[in-house]
């Protein structure tokens, strides 16, 4: 039996100044009529995904995009078609969305969906939208625990929303005590805290302390065949296409990819650079990818322009 042809689709996630994103219902007469999705449509012959997106948003919504960056590429097989969806985050457009195809619109907050049913291929996309643009990696071993906790307090007050607690220099008991202290500080601010390590060594601590998930080194993910159970959020570090493929295989929610710039922690390893980062991300992965390595918050627009979800920082997060 011949393989089902893959239909390439461009989809736009319009994000307004309040951080809300636009969803539209599928009009009568289309497959999955009444389901909610992100606006977009099929690529025509000779079009790039971004060209198709621009055309579709004019046709469907009557808006002309002027700021859009590539984000996630999601494959999905429906009973009637196999699709490869090229998602873009759209933060600037001219005009107000109008229902040119009789669809309904709804602005939604990440993690607070009020419409249903959702087109099945869009489930992972909604999850990715709940991730912040910036995350931090802990530095207690670099700064000293008390100094770092004081800086963590300041970062939480300033809006930090996601933290990876990576402290390889601590023994298990000291790490557990620090994790408890961090979670106590982070919970009132709604900051997600992910512990670092392998499921067999850190999984019980994640569950016991009520942490939000686990972040795994690349070598741990590479040895796994499937997603470990019991983690709300699962992240993976990656340095090349093979490690990104491992993250995809086990169903990671996001990946850190680097190092992008030169760092003191990797003096002998050449950095990817932004072109190398973009080449790897541009292969298309079904999860958000953060740029990491020698970066700070001012690198966020550059990371997103090269296909990244955002930036992750260690030293720069605590200055």
Image (cartoon, rainbow, N blue to C red):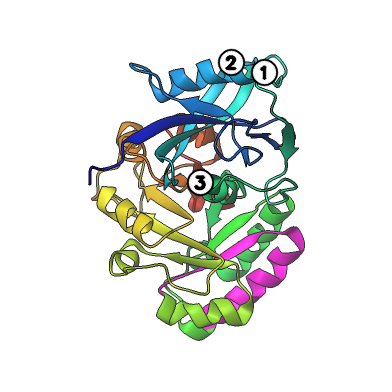
The residue carrying mark 3 is: 121
x and y, in percent, of residue 171 in the image: 45, 82
- Provide residue 209's location: percent of width, then percent of height: 62, 79
Tell me the distance, in whole angstroms, between the alpha carbons under discs 1 and 2: 7 Å
Question: How far, Cα to Cα, is label 3 from label 1?
Answer: 23 Å
- Magenta stretch, main secondary structure class: helix
Disc 2 target residue: 59
Q: Are there few (<14), some (14-19), or many (20+) residues within 10 Å of tag 3?
A: some
User: Would residue 128 be seen by someone viewing this image from the given angle?
Assistant: no
The dot on residue 100 is 1
Residue 31 appearing in the image:
yes
Q: Which residue occupies 43% across, 52% down?
A: 255
Residues drawn in magenta = 174-198
| Contact between labelled residues 2 and 1, with CB atoms less than 8 Å apart | yes
The answer to whether residue 130 is above or below residue 147 is above
Q: Residue at x 38, y 21 (%)?
A: 48
Instruction: Tell whether 282 sits left or right of 1.
Output: right
Q: Secondary structure at mark 1?
A: loop
């Amino acid at each position: 039996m011949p393989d089902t042809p893959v239909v390439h689709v461009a989809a736009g996630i319009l994000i307004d100044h309040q951080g809300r994103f636009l969803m539209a219902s599928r009009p009568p007469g289309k497959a999955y009529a009444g389901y909610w999705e992100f606006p977009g449509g099929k690529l025509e012959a000779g079009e790039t995904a971004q060209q198709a997106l621009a055309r579709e948003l004019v046709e469907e919504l009557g808006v002309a995009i002027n700021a859009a960056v590539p984000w996630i590429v999601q494959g999905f097989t429906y009973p009637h078609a196999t699709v490869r969806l090229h998602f873009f985050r759209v933060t600037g457009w001219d005009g107000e969305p109008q229902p040119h195809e009789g669809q309904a619109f709804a602005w939604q907050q990440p993690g607070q969906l009020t419409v249903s049913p959702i087109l099945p291929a869009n489930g992972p996309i909604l999850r990715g939208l709940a991730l912040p643009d910036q995350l931090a990696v802990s530095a207690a071993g670099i700064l000293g625990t008390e100094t770092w906790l004081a800086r963590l307090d300041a970062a939480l007050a300033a809006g930090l929303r996601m933290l990876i607690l990576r402290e390889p220099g601590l023994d298990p008991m000291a790490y557990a005590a620090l994790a408890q202290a961090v979670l106590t500080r982070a919970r009132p601010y709604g900051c997600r805290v992910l512990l670092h390590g392998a499921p067999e060594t850190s999984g019980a601590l994640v569950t016991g302390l009520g942490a939000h998930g686990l972040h795994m080194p690349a070598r741990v993910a590479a040895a796994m065949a499937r997603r470990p159970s019991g983690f709300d959020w699962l992240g993976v570090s990656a340095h090349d296409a093979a490690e990104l493929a491992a993250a995809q295989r086990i169903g990671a929610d996001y990946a850190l990819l680097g190092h992008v710039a030169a760092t003191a922690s990797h003096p002998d390893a050449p950095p990817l650079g932004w072109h190398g980062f973009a080449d790897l991300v541009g292969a298309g992965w079904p999860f958000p990818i953060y740029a990491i390595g020698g970066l700070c918050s001012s690198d966020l627009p550059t990371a997103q322009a090269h296909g990244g979800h955002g930036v992750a920082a260690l030293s720069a997060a605590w200055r």
